Image (spheres, rainbow, N blue to C red):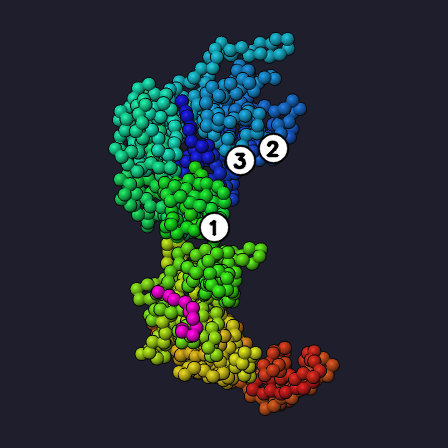
């Protein structure tokens, strides 16, 4: 007797959540397999397997050829069956080369399968449920001719017999005429393993009017146990006991104390699978209702109750008992809406077992794929408690891991999970369903209405932003549902910085202007004064989420999780509180410290929050004219360094810095912030190594905002880029702005809000020893290089770190990264700057400046200096004359366009030298009216066209 009182959705979800299969194969589509126990066992013994991609494809239909293979694997075992072959074609459409030919031949010879009247078998055709059942019955020993599995009504006889011995158990919607799917085939084969084999005492065949009819002395009878082990624990001989004698079935309980079956094969555990409950509930239930639903005739006054696998208080399941499973007298607070209450009834002994299983919500914090048993790590958002409903259980460390196919999850996925207190481990994890919409209303502790639909709260509901009371109507949320359609997790809709703003000033319709208005600093740094649908004076000085209607009227809602680093007051009167003196806000913190080289932000003494790559910073700064500019940055690494204390004058506190910000849920990670840095120390300081290529320096540039700078090719953060170096550096800077003769390597570079490098420090001797000189030599050894000296043997040998950052710089200042020290060539004239890590003793950075003077790279000898160069141009050809050349020497000649003080390289050609003077032609399309520079080694010639 089975009664399932809960919703179908709840039951299916519950079963998928709490089925345990620790040793079974993990298919990538495990979550879509309905008959998990059957698939695990059948695949575990090798009868049916998954695909090469790791999936099982449970709903894919079974072909007739594949069905024959399953039957052979069942009867002969997968290993023996794999050697089956066909000497001749068993059917005219099954050649011996067909992958299923051997299986089809065997099943045909054993009388298990038949072809069609036209002599075909149709191996790729789908197989009906009835036809597959007929095959299974044949493998169990049933004779088609005796049992009536032939003729026009064969399917009636087949399904009657199959249902009679339980081959379709587990599929209440079996339709024999439909094509059988792979997981249905696994289910029916699984049932067959536990079915009893049959045999016949005698069979006689007679000819009646030309037709052969088999007459049996007896109907099929069950085969005795004989010498076979009783591994299925049933009377007589089951199929598995004869053909899979190492497959063992044991009745036990699972980690939730539910009656269960444990399957092992050859001593290895396949899995433990809970029995289907006799009745299932999804909320607290009266004990008298359980009595009625189980059709009991006698009470069980000591029915055992288990909570997450741990024994709780016994209860009396009796007629008319109005006390509930969870009450003040027993199991207090253990059951509520969203709990799963599974009841198992042993009618023979009149024993009732009640298992309470809670579903919790969490997020995937990480997943580990590169181990033998991949797993995900679950961060519980719900409060997990012991059976006293108050003592919390920490789900952390190894307890937060769940072995599974990690392809089914991504980091930050919201998941439902179950936890067994008796096993002290997570037992199941599935992704939660979600619904998005605008919050209409909510009733504390009971329900909420989202997009006009009411949802009840699940017992273990959690809120990403900490408290239910932080929710605001007319704001958008994402709710996650448990298996019963109840809300188990509420999150703000995915953060969209473009819909956030800071409220700078408000006025109500009661003022002399007669309208509700606000002044907003938008997420793009612009300032807007807009009309609003209500009086929002209470939101002044905070961060809001806004919407604008078709008429341009704004509706504001305070953002969730807004924090401030002081009693921040806005500047409602500039005459009293001029911005140039007091800033946009007042009463912040004089200990504010935010550096873009680290995630931690000290908003005030004792309070630290964190920025990440998604954090949006809106920063207010004063201009020289006393106005306020708002700049926007995304990501802590891109934001400026902001400090109350100017590090150049540490004894003087510059200004209190105000910060208003939102965080992600109850965490300390900032999502959106407004920072009043007017008058504070603001710089884009980074403590990374910065290299400036001297040869790339342009003439001084003055842009439209009167910023004056030099543009350099550079290496910053191990990235080849360009850097704008402010013409006038701050006091203390070691950078030589405009220097075009000496390469510079600096650290702790500071940038202003225009992106100009304003200062930098020399490389610290406590971090690196700076190496400079001439001569770079390729040496034997994977991580060795010689520096200085006129020959390799005379050089100083250094070890290069395996992750060293190495670069070539050509004579035009073009920088090229070197991935391997083996790619560095010997060059006696190349200059270098190396940074030797004082801790490891290895070269961490190496910058090699090529000297382009006609020397062949790698020659290992001194180069030859030219004495002169000249050039002319005519009809696409540049004629170059080099003076002071050596016969056979190769001389690289470069032609560049002179563009506003910057050289733009066009082409380089190698010219083979003659004795004393060499003349060569180079193809190049030059423009009339332009100026070009022709260079070779240390000589250059200005060519006007």
Q: Is residue 612 above or below residue 944?
A: above
Which residue range is magenta in the image? 567-577
At label 2, counting other C-alpha atoms closer than 10 Å, the crowd grade (few under 14, some 14-19, many 20 or more) is: few
At 61% from the left and 24% from the top, the residue drawn is 115
Circle 1 sits on which residue?
474
Where is residue 212? Give x, y as percent. Answer: 60, 12
Q: Quadrant of residue 620?
A: bottom left
Comparing 760 with 609, the one in front is 609
Q: Is residue 197 above or below residue 89?
A: above
At label 3, counting other C-alpha atoms closer than 10 Å, the crowd grade (few under 14, some 14-19, many 20 or more) is: some
Where is residue 52? Give x, y as percent. Answer: 51, 43
Q: Quadrant of the C terminus?
A: bottom right
Of the numbered discs 1 and 3, the one sitting upstream in the chain is: 3
Q: Give the label on residue 59, or none.
A: 3
The residues tagged by marks 2 and 3 sit, at their Cα atoms, a distance apart of 16 Å
Q: Quadrant of residue 688?
A: bottom left
Q: Give the label on residue 124, or none.
A: 2
Number of callouts: 3
């Amino acid at each position: 007797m089975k009664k399932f009182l809960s919703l179908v959705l709840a039951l299916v979800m519950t079963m998928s959540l709490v089925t345990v299969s620790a040793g079974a194969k993990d298919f990538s589509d495990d979550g879509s397999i309905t008959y998990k126990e059957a698939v695990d066992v059948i695949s575990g013994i090798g009868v049916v397997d998954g695909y090469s991609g790791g999936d099982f494809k449970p709903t894919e239909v079974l072909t007739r050829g594949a069905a024959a293979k399953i039957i052979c694997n069942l009867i002969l075992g997968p290993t023996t069956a794999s050697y089956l072959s066909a000497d001749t074609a068993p059917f005219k459409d099954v050649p011996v080369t067909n992958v299923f030919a051997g299986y089809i031949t065997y099943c045909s010879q054993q009388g298990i399968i038949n072809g069609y009247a036209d002599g075909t078998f149709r191996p790729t055709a789908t197989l009906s449920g009835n036809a597959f059942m007929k095959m299974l019955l044949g493998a169990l020993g049933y004779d088609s001719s005796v049992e009536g599995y032939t003729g026009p009504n064969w399917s009636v006889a087949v399904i009657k017999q199959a249902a009679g011995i339980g081959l379709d158990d587990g599929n209440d919607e079996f339709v024999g005429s439909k094509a059988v799917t792979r997981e249905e085939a696994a289910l029916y084969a699984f049932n067959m393993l536990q079915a009893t084999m049959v045999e016949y005492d005698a069979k006689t065949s007679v000819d009646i009017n030309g037709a052969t009819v088999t007459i049996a002395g007896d109907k099929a009878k069950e085969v005795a146990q004989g010498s076979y082990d009783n591994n299925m624990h049933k009377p007589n001989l089951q199929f598995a006991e004869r053909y899979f004698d190492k497959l063992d079935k044991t009745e036990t309980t699972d980690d939730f104390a539910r009656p269960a079956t444990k399957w092992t094969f050859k001593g290895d555990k396949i899995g433990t699978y809970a029995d289907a409950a006799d009745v299932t509930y999804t909320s607290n239930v009266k004990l008298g209702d359980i009595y009625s639903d189980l059709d009991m005739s006698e009470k069980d006054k000591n029915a055992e109750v288990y909570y997450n696998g741990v024994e709780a208080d016994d209860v009396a399941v009796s007629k008319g008992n109005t006390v509930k499973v969870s009450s003040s007298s027993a199991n207090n607070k253990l059951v509520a809406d969203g709990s799963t209450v599974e009841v198992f009834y042993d009618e023979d002994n009149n024993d009732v077992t009640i298992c309470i299983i809670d579903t919790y919500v969490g997020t995937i914090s990480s997943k580990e794929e590169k181990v033998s048993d991949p797993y995900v790590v679950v961060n519980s958002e719900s409060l997990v408690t012991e059976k006293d409903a108050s003592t919390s259980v920490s789900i952390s460390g190894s307890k937060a891991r769940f072995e599974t196919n990690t392809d089914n999850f991504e980091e930050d996925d919201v998941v439902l999970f179950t936890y067994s207190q008796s096993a002290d481990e997570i037992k199941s994890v599935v992704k939660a369903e979600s619904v998005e919409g605008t919050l209409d209303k909510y009733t504390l502790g009971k329900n909420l209405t989202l997009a006009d639909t009411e949802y009840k709260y699940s017992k273990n509901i959690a809120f990403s932003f900490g408290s239910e009371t932080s929710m605001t109507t007319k704001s958008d949320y994402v709710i996650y549902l448990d298996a019963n359609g109840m809300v188990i997790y509420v999150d703000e809709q995915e953060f969209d910085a473009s819909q956030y703003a800071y409220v700078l000033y408000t006025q109500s319709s009661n003022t002399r202007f007669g309208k509700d208005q606000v002044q907003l600093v938008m997420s793009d740094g612009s300032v807007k004064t807009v009309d609003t649908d209500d009086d929002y004076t209470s939101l002044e000085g905070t961060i809001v989420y806004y919407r604008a209607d078709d008429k341009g009227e704004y509706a504001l809602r305070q953002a969730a999780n807004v924090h401030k680093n002081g009693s921040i007051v806005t500047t409602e009167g500039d005459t009293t509180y001029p911005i140039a003196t007091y800033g946009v806000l007042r009463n912040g913190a004089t200990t504010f410290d935010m550096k873009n080289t680290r995630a931690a932000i000290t908003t005030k003494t004792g309070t630290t929050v964190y920025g990440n790559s998604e954090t949006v910073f809106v920063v207010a700064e004063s201009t020289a004219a006393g106005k306020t500019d708002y700049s926007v940055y995304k990501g802590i690494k891109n934001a400026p360094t902001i400090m109350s204390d100017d590090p150049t004058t540490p004894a003087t506190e510059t200004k209190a810095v105000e910060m208003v910000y939102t965080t992600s849920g109850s965490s300390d990670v900032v999502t959106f912030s407004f920072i009043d840095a007017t008058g504070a120390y603001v710089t884009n300081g980074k403590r990374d190594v910065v290299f400036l290529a001297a040869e790339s320096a342009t003439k001084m540039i003055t842009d439209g905002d009167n910023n004056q700078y030099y543009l350099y090719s550079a290496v910053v953060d191990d990235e080849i880029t360009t850097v704008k170096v402010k013409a006038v550096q701050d006091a203390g800077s070691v950078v030589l702005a405009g220097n075009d003769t000496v390469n510079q390597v600096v650290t702790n570079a500071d940038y202003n809000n225009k992106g100009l490098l304003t200062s930098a420090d020399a490389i610290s001797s406590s971090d690196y020893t700076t190496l400079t000189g001439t001569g770079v030599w390729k040496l034997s050894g994977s991580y060795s290089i010689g520096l200085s000296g006129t020959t390799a043997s005379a050089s100083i040998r250094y070890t290069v770190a395996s992750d060293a950052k190495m670069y070539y710089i050509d004579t035009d200042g073009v920088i090229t990264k070197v991935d391997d020290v083996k790619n560095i060539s010997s060059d006696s004239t190349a200059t270098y700057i190396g940074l030797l890590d004082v801790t490891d003793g290895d070269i961490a950075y190496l910058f090699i400046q090529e000297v382009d003077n006609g020397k062949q790279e790698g020659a290992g000898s001194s180069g030859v200096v030219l004495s002169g160069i000249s050039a002319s141009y005519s009809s696409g050809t540049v004629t170059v004359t080099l003076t002071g050349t050596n016969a056979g020497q190769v001389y690289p000649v470069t032609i560049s366009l002179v563009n506003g003080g910057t050289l733009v390289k066009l082409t380089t050609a190698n010219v083979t030298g003659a004795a004393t003077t060499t003349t060569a032609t180079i193809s190049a399309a030059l423009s009339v009216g332009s100026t070009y520079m022709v260079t070779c080694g240390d000589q250059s010639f200005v060519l006007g066209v």
